Image: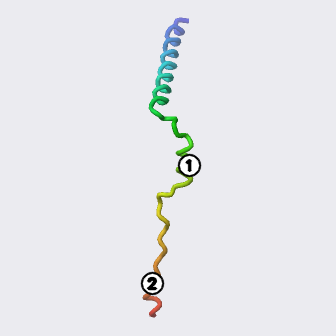
Amino acid sequence: MDIILYLIPIALGLGLLGLVAFLWSMKSGQFEDLDGAANRILFDEDDAPPAMPERNTDRERG
């Protein structure tokens, strides 16, 4: 029964640590744009279109 005297403060400390981490993440803007990452992976417009292969004129001269 003595172990509960150790486990309750440890559980309360971990809960408090989790609450502090959550409040920090809210304050630093971690949850500001939840849909942006999902849209960026689907609509990536930074890539250039693939280049068309050039025709080899040496084969045509044959």
Please identify the residue farthest to the left as the structure is shown: 58
As drawn, the residue found furthest toward the bottom would be 62
Q: In the drawing, what numbered circle is on residue 13?
A: none
Query: Which mark sits nearer the N-terminus, 1 or 2?
Result: 1
Foreground label between 1 and 2: 1
Amino acid tagged 2: Asn
Residue 25: % across, % down: 47, 30
Tell me the SS state at disc 2: loop
User: Label 2 near label 1: C-beta < 8 Å?
Assistant: no
- At label 1, counting other C-alpha atoms closer than 10 Å, the crowd grade (few under 14, some 14-19, many 20 or more) is few
* Residue sitting at x 52%, y 16%: 11
Quadrant of the frame with the N terminus: top right
Relative image position of residue 31 (x, y in whole percent): 52, 35
Q: Residues within 10 Å of mark 2 (few under 14, many from 20)?
A: few
* Quadrant placement of the C terminus: bottom left
| Residue position for label 2 | 56
6 lies above or below 41: above
The residue shown at (46%, 79%) is 54
Distance from disc 1 to disc 2, alpha carbons, whole Å, reads: 40 Å
Residue 18: where, in percent of width, then height? Answer: 50, 23
Residue under the image location 55 percent in, 40 percent down = 34
Identify the element where label 1 is drawn: helix
Which residue lies under the disc numbered 1? 39
Q: Between residues 2 and 40, which one lies in front from this camera angle? A: 40
Which residue: 54% across, 9% down? 4
Its colouring scheme is: rainbow
